[in-house]
Amino acid sequence: MGPTPILDIMMSPGQRFHGLDTQGGLRTGLRIYERLRSVAPDLPIVVFTNVTDRSVAQSFSRDARVWFYRKPDFLPHQFAAAVSHILSEVRRTTAGPKQ
């Protein structure tokens, strides 16, 4: 199993994303997501954010390899349990035949 990134939509753009349309950091996670998808279309990605814009959630709902969570809906231990479940599912679905 490879990496499963966890993104927040609102992040500092840093040097790598400086100059891109991140709306001052409000949409940096979207730019990272787009870049990840361009090089790894099947990579599982977890998005955990405070962003309430429905269009953001809808854009992720079209991607079967994205799990989208809103921070207000989860306590930290609930989010950790959800990520643990996701990683188990990713391992199960990407594991090759047993040798």
Image (cartoon, rainbow, N blue to C red):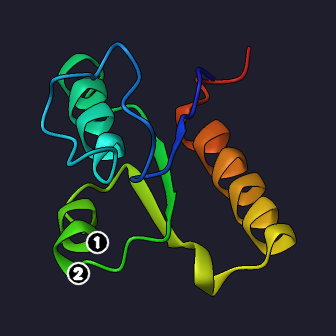
Secondary structure state at the residue bearing disc 2: helix
Q: Position of residue 6 (x, y in %)?
A: 56, 43
Mark 1 nearby-residue class (10 Å; few <14, some 14–19, many ≥20): some
Front position in the image: 19 or 89: 19
Q: Quadrant of residue 62?
A: bottom left
Mark 1–mark 2 CB contact (< 8 Å): yes
Relative horizontal placement of residue 21, taking residue 13 as reference (left or right): left
Q: How far apart are marks 1 and 2 (CA)?
A: 5 Å
Residue at 27%, 45% (x, y): give it: 24
Q: Position of residue 99 (x, y in %)?
A: 74, 14
Residue at 28%, 50% (x, y): give it: 27
Front position in the image: 73 or 93: 73
Front position in the image: 42 or 77: 77
Residue 57 is tagged as 1
Amino acid type at mark 2: Arg
Q: Position of residue 36 (x, y in %)?
A: 31, 26
Q: In which quarter of the image is residue 71?
A: bottom right
Residue 54 is tagged as 2
For residue 68, above or below residue 19: below
Relative horizontal placement of residue 13, taking residue 5 as reference (left or right): left
Residue at 58%, 23% (x, y): give it: 96
Q: Position of residue 39 (x, y in %)?
A: 24, 16
The residue lying furthest to the right in this view is 77
The residue lying furthest to the front in this view is 24
